[in-house]
Image: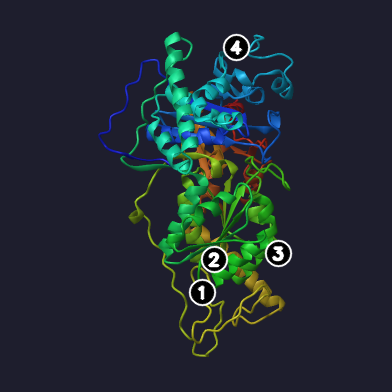
Amino acid sequence: MATATRLPDEAGATLQAAAPESVVVRFAGDSGDGMQLTGGQFTLSTALAGNDLATFPDFPAEIRAPQGTLFGVSAFQINFGSGRIDTAGDAPDVLVAMNPAALKVNLPDLRAGGLIIADSGEFGDRNLKKAHYETNPLEDGSLAAYQLLAFDISKQTLESVKAFGLGNKDALRCKNMWTLGLALWMFGRPRAPIIDWLSQKFARSEVLRDANIAALNAGHAFGETAELSGPLKQFRLSPAEAEPGLYRTVTGADALSLGLVAGAKLSGLPMFFGGYPITPASAILHSLARLREFNVTTFQAEDEIAAICSAIGAAYAGNLAVTSSSGPGIALKTEAMGLATMTELPLVIVNSQRGGPSTGLPTKTEQSDLYQAVYGRNGDTPIPVISARSPSDCFDVAIEACRLALAFMTPVILLTDGYIANAAEPWKVPDAEAYEPFPVTFHEAIPESGKLNPYLRDPETLKRVWVKPGTPGLMHRIGGIEKNYDTGNLDYSAANHQKMTDTRKAKIDGIARYIPAQTVETGPDKGPLVVVGWGSTYGPIRQAVELVRARGHDVAHIHIRHIWPLPANLGDLLKGYDRILVPEMNTGQLKTLLRDQFLVDARPLNKVSGQPFRIAEIEAAILGMLQ
């Protein structure tokens, strides 16, 4: 995490006239080369330099894939600049390739004329064969369309740490710090924050601390020396304009965890989180486990079913209850989600979506669980569904999920995805006073009859009363078997089941009256074309729409946060446009939902490659629909 305070009169660095406004850098290497760590620390230094940024960690599902193989490549991409940054970038300007496999996998994404920095020491016959190269690409002219800087990073690293007496294997583990030092020099980033971090990380081993710092400094010094001889140039980007305040870098998982804690504080309730490790949702469990001082209890259960059932029990006891998983785990939780709906207990269910079905693509992103969230349960089991659009947006969306769950005594599904969970961006720490509390009042009045109906409802919201177990005079029973509307006793009768089913549906449908009206992000509220998105497609859609509008086309962008129930004005809003394009990382699930609910001719733009949309892909689709 990086934090920095931006003052109103803070001056930015001076840019040369030809300097770029943003740069996309991708670090790529073996899954054991520390690329995620390198990218994370470069992100820290970039945030402290005041640039806006967005990152995209992209790593294999294997814990440790065979070294040097194509499927073992791990990459970290960062787009940073002096203007607003909404995506991690379509194509890297700079590719740092630590071995032949990293070059082969990532070269197709590099922009024409982009810069390749390659570790020539790893381009031996064995590694070339593993990457299916017949000849050495650093020498055969196949990279003529790019700028190429190839030098032996491995040898340079070994030289820089020779004095510390490390074995060859341990010495080469410092290679990522050497590479980071070079990158810090290239973009004028300070080394001090990284040195401080290394000092903390290796506080118990002076040798490893000093070796890594030496490698970092050696990489930085190499950049200075190489520039003197010509081939390596330094880029400087001024800080991005930003409102005064305290900023920090935040991933989606971190922001969501903080938002859940904020929701608990705004409600005045203790928070209980029941979870089970699964990629990419595990980071939420890890983050919340570090926040115990905020009256947060975390429980790592033996399986997904136990995790959600423990949360339901905590909700029954009067806690703000939360559980999380990804698509396969959500499938296992489904029966218990029906129990939470039948008992009408407040529960936040976080789904960090990944590629599916089944195990699918555990470390890749997708938006393919929308049907599962809206429809995927037995019986008529309506549950509100909301989605986050970016890592920082997870904070506000988590608070909203808590508010809805408590205001309507219902489980709520919060959708993020692997990209949002792992990506990072700057976040202005909000003023806590700006958030309106939503305190909970537990039912304590003893009825004149002496017998409580736990399904006694608020006539406006239809939420039932919430009674803590053990409240004097209010002994009651709830459960998964249908209950009588008037007494709360077991009741299998047809008329009662009809009434209870209709009531549960009306309660969730009625939430549309208590959520904000749908707004237009960019463009007019009626016209020839609107691009409708949800979740992490926000950044590329926004950029694509702005590019098309800059060409003179009257295109609009609508981004939906409340997926179910949909905002009350959304149907009328959509009917004001001639054409509707819905980009989403699935086979057309929101498109189908919009057609079903509003009878509009929504057209899909689908992508299920495990990678986020590129701006150019959406821009091309927009232009195609305008022809």
User: Where residue 346 is drawn, which disc sits there?
Assistant: 2
Q: Which residue is mark 3?
A: 379
Three-letter code, disc 1 = Trp
Q: Which residue is mark 4?
A: 145
> Position of 365 compared to 458: left or right?
right
Three-letter code, disc 2 = Pro
Image marks 2 and 4: residues in contact by CB distance under 8 Å: no
In the image, what residue occupies the spot 74% across and 21% down?
129
Sequence-first disc among 2 and 4: 4
Q: Nearer the viewer, residue 331 or 121?
A: 121
Q: Position of residue 566 (x, y in %)?
A: 55, 53
Sequence-first disc among 4 and 3: 4
Q: Is residue 467 above or below residue 6?
A: below
Task: Report which quarter residue 453 is drawn in.
Answer: bottom right
In the image, what residue occupies the spot 57% across and 34% down?
34
The kind of secondary structure element at disc 4 is loop
